[in-house]
Amino acid sequence: MVDLGKKSYLQILFFLSFLILISALTIQYIFGYQPCNLCIIERIPYGLAIIILTLNYIFKKDQIFYTILLLLVFSFSIIISVYHFGIEQGFIEESAVCASKNIDLMTKEQVLNSLKELNISCKDVAFRIFGLSLTTYNIFVSILMFVISIKIFLLNNNDIKK
């Protein structure tokens, strides 16, 4: 890995998180591809990363704490992306996370209204880039961001030892 400073790695994480969220929203609202529930959940780590990185920038103390939070966030991102990939490939059955609503708890009017809404299955890939689903790309990006977070953690530990 290129040996950049800690500040550069933090900026890369912030920029990538921002770019990924903007891209997902563009695909949804401009190109008109509706995400499934897991696709929406996969956005959460990037929003959390932006918040954590902003707090890290504002409050210069507790750098290791923020880095550990980033490691946890990107660990979650990897897990949920691999799970979603497993559903897309048919290795794992769709779960309640993929169901839009619990019909048993709904009134007749709510059921009729929910039937009018689009219910996107987690196993159906609506948008591909070079033949790969966005979930596949998310696995690679999440692993990359996890590795960058490890590098930041190691740089923080080296700063403490000095």
Image (cartoon, rainbow, N blue to C red):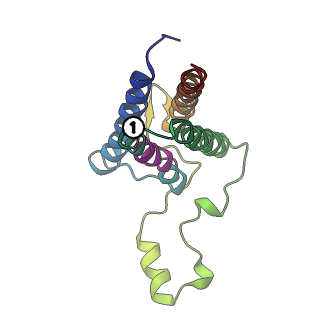
Residue 103 lies, with reference to residue 90, above or below; the image says: below
Q: Nearer the viewer, residue 116 or 47?
A: 47
Residue 150 horizontal/vertical position (percent)? 59, 27
- For residue 122, side relative to residue 59 (left or right): right
Look at the magenta stretch and give its main secondary structure. helix
Residue 128 or residue 76, whichever sits in front: 76
For badge 1, the amino acid type reads Ile
**Would residue 112 be found to the left or right of residue 147 on screen?**
left
Is residue 43 magenta-colored? yes
Task: Estimate the x, y position of residue 102 in percent, counting from the top left.
Answer: 59, 75
Instruction: Decide: is 96 above or below 143.
Output: below
Which contiguous range is marked in magenta? 42-53
Relative side of 71 to 91, left or right? left
Horizontal side, residue 129 vs residue 103: left or right: left
Q: Position of residue 37 (x, y in %)?
A: 52, 57
To which residue does mark 1 refer? 20
Residue 79, image quadrant: top right
Q: Is residue 147 positioned above or below 125 on the image?
A: above
Task: Name the residue furthest top.
Answer: 2
Tell whether position 28 is magenta: no
Tell me the residue at 71%/52% (across/down): 93
**Nearer to the camera, 10 or 158:** 158
Instruction: State the residue at coordinates (67%, 42%).
Output: 86
Q: Please report the residue visible at 59 percent of the width from the left and 48 percent of the height from the top.
A: 123
Q: Residue at x 50, y 46 (%)?
A: 45
Along the viewing direction, whichever of 10 and 162 lies nearer the viewer: 162
Graded by Cα atoms within 10 Å as few (under 14), some (14 to 19) or many (20 or more), the crowding at tag 1 reads: some
In the rendered image, residue 140, in percent from the top left (x then y), is placed at: 55, 28
Q: Secondary structure at mark 1?
A: helix
- Outermost residue toward the front in this view: 162
Q: Quadrant of the C terminus?
A: top right
